[in-house]
Structure formats: C-alpha cells, structure tokens
Amino acid sequence: MKKVYLDTNATTKPYPEVVEEMLPFFKEAYGNASSIYGFGRTAKKGLETARERVRKLIGAEFADEIVFTSGGTESDNCAIKQILRTSTNKGKHIITTCVEHKAVLNTCRYLEESGVRVTYLNVDEYGRINLEELEKSIAADTVLISVMSANNETGTLMPIEEVGIIAKKNNILFHTDAVQLIGKMPFDVKKSGADLVSISAHKINGPKGVGALFVKRGTPLTPYFHGGYQERGLRAGTENVPGIVGFGKACEMTASRLDENREKIGALKKLLYEGIKRSIKDIKLNGDPEKCLPNTLNVSFAYIEGEAIVLNLDAEGIAVSTGSACTSGSSDPSYVLKNMKVGPLFIQGAIRFSLGVFTSREDIDCVIEKLPRIIEKLRNISPVN
Ligand SMILES: *Cc1c(COP(=O)(O)O)cnc(C)c1O
C-alpha cells in the first residue's frame, strides 16, 4: 500500500544528507566538544559549523546568539522562565496569545501558580491577534511578550514584525516561537524585532531532540542548567553533537531550497484544497486563506469527528492529524479552533493536512481519491447528519 505522510507539522522525515552528516559523529568523531585534544576539537568544529548554519538560516548577526537546546519545548520554557527570573524586580506580567503551542501555554500556566500575571490575547476568526488589544494589555510591569510566528494547527501567520515594533517602543522583551515558520518561509530575525526565538530541528527535516534558542546580544538571560560551561554557561551539559550537526545540515539544506520548496509545496496544497472542495460539500477552511504557511491546510468536515477521519485515512496508509499532536488521544475539540470561535457544526471534524519537502503530486492525488468516500461513509453512519 502506498504510504502518504501529511503530518509534517508534527514532525518531518530527516533529509538523507542530514543522517549521513551525523554518522561520523557517532562512529569516529565521538569526542567531548569541551576536550582540547583532537577528538574533542573535531566535535567542537562540528558544533561551530552547525551554529554558523543556524545563524545564517535566521539571519542573526552573531553565531554566539544561537544557544543549542533539546528542541522547541526547551527553548520556549527557557525563554519565558528565565526572562521572568532575570527581571523579577522589574515586573511580573507576561503577554502571550490563547493559541500558542502548549510549550508556551503550559509554561505560562505554571508561572501563574507562582504569582505571575499572564494576559492571553484573543484571536479573530482567522486565528490572528489584534494589535490594539496587545497595546492596551501592556502594563508598567510587563516584562515579556511571547507571540508565535505561525500557528501549528492552522498555519495562520501572526503579525510579528508589528509586535516587535510595539515591544521595542515599550521597552519590553519579545519572544517568538518560530518553530513552524522557520524553514517554510523566509525568516529574518532582525526584521522580526525578536529578542528571543525558538527553533526546532525535527520540524525542518532534521533530527528529533535538538533545537535552538536565539538570544539577541544584550538580552539578560541567566543560566538555567547549572553545571559545566557549555553554551556560554547558559545551558550546561555535554552537547548532543551528532544531533546538533544534523540540525546544522538541515538548516543549510532548508535555506538553499527555501523558495523552490515554498512554491512547490504551496502549489500542492492548492491542488489538495481544490480537490477537496470539488468533491466534498459542507466543509470549512480553518485559518487565514492568504496569510498562512504554504504547507498547512486545516479543513473541517461537518457532521463527523476528525478522529474517525484520521483513523479511516490511516487504514488507507495516509497520515494526517486532527490538530496538534500533543492533544491527540483526547477527543476534546482543539483549543485553537475554539478560540477562533469555530462553531459546533465544524469544530469536531477538523483535519490538518501538513505538506513537506517530500510531498509529491501522487500523494495529493491519493488523498483526493480516497477522502471523499471516507467522508461519505462516516456521514452516512453519523447520528448528527
Ligand atoms: C513542535 C512545536 C514545538 C515543540 O518543539 P519540540 O522540538 O517538539 O519540543 C513548539 N512550538 C511549536 C509551534 C511547534 O510546532
């Protein structure tokens, strides 16, 4: 059976070149990057090449602004918790949005337990924040604004450059979780105005368990893993050299093919949506039809449950998701769609198709061929139809 993978917002297949580049760092160059002899120097060189490649992908000025972490979740945790620690005498108020990834939302919820105030900005029907609401939320003790660059469930782009300007004007630090945007669209850290940016390798065809936090020079950040002097003392612990090397290679490949992939993937997404619209009625597009990631298509099918669609597509070898991977397994409707006020007819039947660099025309044809029958079958047995 043909296998079709359309869940790249959950994770991606590593480029074969990424795996190749990692292998020597398991087999021969296994030294500790902090050691001064040859083995260590080779590992260190691998690390620094990777740091340079990450720097280039996001347009950072200095390589030492890149701190390697275990992934997007750690980067989000670090950015938010440490900025708060560093600025406790200045204030205890954070502004974020109600549609952030759980790595940001649950970090904020945790901080609320210890007395931090958090404002969760509302979003409109497309999942975008209102900049006036942001400005009104700013208080004398606001220390951080955290707004994601693009939403993982709907692909909706946030106006981060405008957020960056507002943050700067008010002398507040700005963090953006750019895990979903980086690698899919051009991202320039200087233009974004962000002081802190979260990145994850496995969302851009790199290995799992590795990522980075961009920390703009001059941003007050205290060490959060205490131990050795790795990563400028910010994050102690022997570095995951093979993972970081793979991450670097993924950044390099992503950067060199960005425009080409963006166009190809965007065309395939359009084809998929046209195909769905043509053959299935009572559907709704979730997210912004224009200001959206080129790879993400979130569509609701009325009268049926998203989970049933996922399972039926899986039986045909097609992998899609109901939304964020972290919430699957529960049948609660998506909090992202709920906050976008998607109504009862459509909220349960949402499916996220996320395409990637390995998605082919055949993959899309396969979905367009199989999906209508599945939807029809499920609607025929649905009690709410
Ligand atoms: C996947 C994802 C994360 C988490 O990254 P990990 O590397 O899996 O920890 C954070 N934010 C967003 C928007 C994501 O899509």
Image (spheres, rainbow, N blue to C red):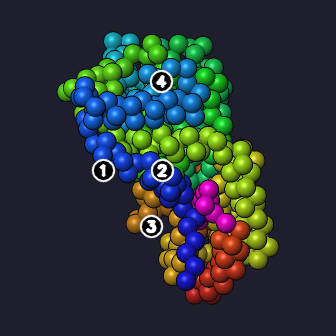
Residue lying furthest front: 38
- Residue 27 is marked as 1
Q: Earlier in the sequence, mark 1 or mark 4?
A: 1
Indicate the amino acid at tag 3. Ser
Residue located at (74% from left, 51% from top): 263
- Of circles 1 and 3, which is in front? 1
Which residue is tagged 2? 18
Q: Earlier in the sequence, mark 2 or mark 3?
A: 2
Predominant SS along the magenta part: loop
Indicate the amino acid at tag 2. Val
In the structure shown, which secondary structural element does the residue marked by tag 2 occupy? helix
- Of circles 2 and 3, which is in front? 2
Q: Earlier in the sequence, mark 3 or mark 4?
A: 4
Residue located at (50% from left, 20% from top): 62
Above or below for 281 versus 232: below
Which residue is tagged 4? 63
In the rendered view of the protein, which quadrant contains the N terminus?
bottom right
Rendering coords of residue 238 (x, y %)? 25, 35
Rendering coords of residue 30 (x, y %)? 28, 42
Alpha-carbon distance for marks 2 and 3? 36 Å
Numbered circles on residues, count? 4
Q: Earlier in the sequence, mark 1 or mark 2?
A: 2
Alpha-carbon distance for marks 1 and 4? 27 Å
Rendering coords of residue 95 (x, y %)? 49, 29
Q: How busy is the neighbourhood of tag 2: few (under 14 within 10 Å), some, or many (20 plus)?
A: many
Which residue is tagged 3? 331
